[in-house]
Image (spheres, rainbow, N blue to C red):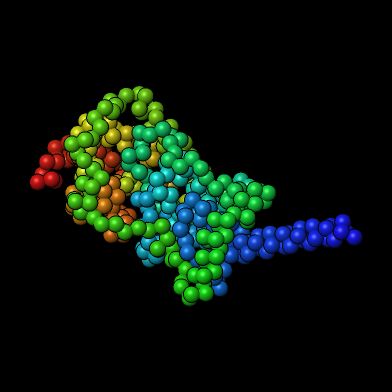
């Protein structure tokens, strides 16, 4: 009798556990805070953050025909502004601190899903436009340079078996599922695509100098630009940019070099790497200009922005106003690089930043 009761109790516990696990999984699937299974539900409010967890779901299930991507230099773009200027329906999938390869892999996956290429059926309207930020300081890094090694790969594939890492993840359940339910019950609206991944920091010279000390710039760095450096840039661009661009000839890629502040150029002058960097730019530019569906932009001659520390929170990051200006410049054709003008623009760039009075910044 005791043994029979023990068995009953054991099976009852198993049934309760299985039921709780099923309810947990069902709740995660319904709310789906990272959009792994479906697009946002109209009756739920979503807090969008955690780019590397959310971006793949956005590109997988959101409806759009234009995509904004890049590093933190793309985070403050407002898709609503792009849509107004370009007549698009866009989303933003930025990857803060990403290398070229990470962005290329994610962009290729997004475009594959929209075009029906590879293993992904094209169930949504196709993407016709991509706005892509190329971090200028990444041209001479290794082609596969990565700042983030760990990735939620279970969200990036179509393997249902590794979804257990999502369905039964305590952090996902408490910090995302339940928080979105609470967000909904409190009547708060969902995070807009304009707000998603955006940031606002103090700007100005004092703020820049909090992270940039020109008296302690590392000068023990390579300064030459020879065949080895050229080969590295070619590998970086062909493996991570032109390979994606050429795969989707019907997509127009608006690509631009991120316009860092005058303090960044000061650091190049101190390290004596300004020529090296602009040669790397020349190599990359010549490769990109061979792609007929690329519109390449360079804003290094927008001196009223670059030389004004009030637009920057550190030597590289500009404020949201500059993201808006970049969209306007691209829409107007300002800064467009062509085969006819790129050498002239490079010469002017070297002339200006080689002879600039950097000491005057700090006076």
Q: Is residue 134 visible?
A: yes
> Horizontal and vertical percent for residue 258?
32, 47
Nearest the viewer among 303 and 47 is 47
Nearest the viewer among 47 and 293 is 47
Say which residue appears at 52% left-offset and 74% top-offset. 185
**Quick check: 296 above or below 223?**
below
- Residue 104 in the figure: left or right of residue 202: right
Q: How many marks?
A: 0
Say which residue appears at 25% left-offset and 57% top-offset. 202
Nearest the viewer among 10 and 128 is 10
Q: Is residue 57 visible?
A: no
Quarter of the image containing the N terminus? bottom right
Say which residue appears at 61% left-offset and 59% top-offset. 37
> Horizontal and vertical percent for residue 348?
20, 40
**Quick check: 221 above or below 326?**
above
Say which residue appears at 40% left-offset and 45% top-offset. 97
> Horizontal and vertical percent for residue 17?
72, 59
- Residue 119 in the figure: left or right of residue 252: right
> Horizontal and vertical percent for residue 356?
14, 40
């Amino acid at each position: 009798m005791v043994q029979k009761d023990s068995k009953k109790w054991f099976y009852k516990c198993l049934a309760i556990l299985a039921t709780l696990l099923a309810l947990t999984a069902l709740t995660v699937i319904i709310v789906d805070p990272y959009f792994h299974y479906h697009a946002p539900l109209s009756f739920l409010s979503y807090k969008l953050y955690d780019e590397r967890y959310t971006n793949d779901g956005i590109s997988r299930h959101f409806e759009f025909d234009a995509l904004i991507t890049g590093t933190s230099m793309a985070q403050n773009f407002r898709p609503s502004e792009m849509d107004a200027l370009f007549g698009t329906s866009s989303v933003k999938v930025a990857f803060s601190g990403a290398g070229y390869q990470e962005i290329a892999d994610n962009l290729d996956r997004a475009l594959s899903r929209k075009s029906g290429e590879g293993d992904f059926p094209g169930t949504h309207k196709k993407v016709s436009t991509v706005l892509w930020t190329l971090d200028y300081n990444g041209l001479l890094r290794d082609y596969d340079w990565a700042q983030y090694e760990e990735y939620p790969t279970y969200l990036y594939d179509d393997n249902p078996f590794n979804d257990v890492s999502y369905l039964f993840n305590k952090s996902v359940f408490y910090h995302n599922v339940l928080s979105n339910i609470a967000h909904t019950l409190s009547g708060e609206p969902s995070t807009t695509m304009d707000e998603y991944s955006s940031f606002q920091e103090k700007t100005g010279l004092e703020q820049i100098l909090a992270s940039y000390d020109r008296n302690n710039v590392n000068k023990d760095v390579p300064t030459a630009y020879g065949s080895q450096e050229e080969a590295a840039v070619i590998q970086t661009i062909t493996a991570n940019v032109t390979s994606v661009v050429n795969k989707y000839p019907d997509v127009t890629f608006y690509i631009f070099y991120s316009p860092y502040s005058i303090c960044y150029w000061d650091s190049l002058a101190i390290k004596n790497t300004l020529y090296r960097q602009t040669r790397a730019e020349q190599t990359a530019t010549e490769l990109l200009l061979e792609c007929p569906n690329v519109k390449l932009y360079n804003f290094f001659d927008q001196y009223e922005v670059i030389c004004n520390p009030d637009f920057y929170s550190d030597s590289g990051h500009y404020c949201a106003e500059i993201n808006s200006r970049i969209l306007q410049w691209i829409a107007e054709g300002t800064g467009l690089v062509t085969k006819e003008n790129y050498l002239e623009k490079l010469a002017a760039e070297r002339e200006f930043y080689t002879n600039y009075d950097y000491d005057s910044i700090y006076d």
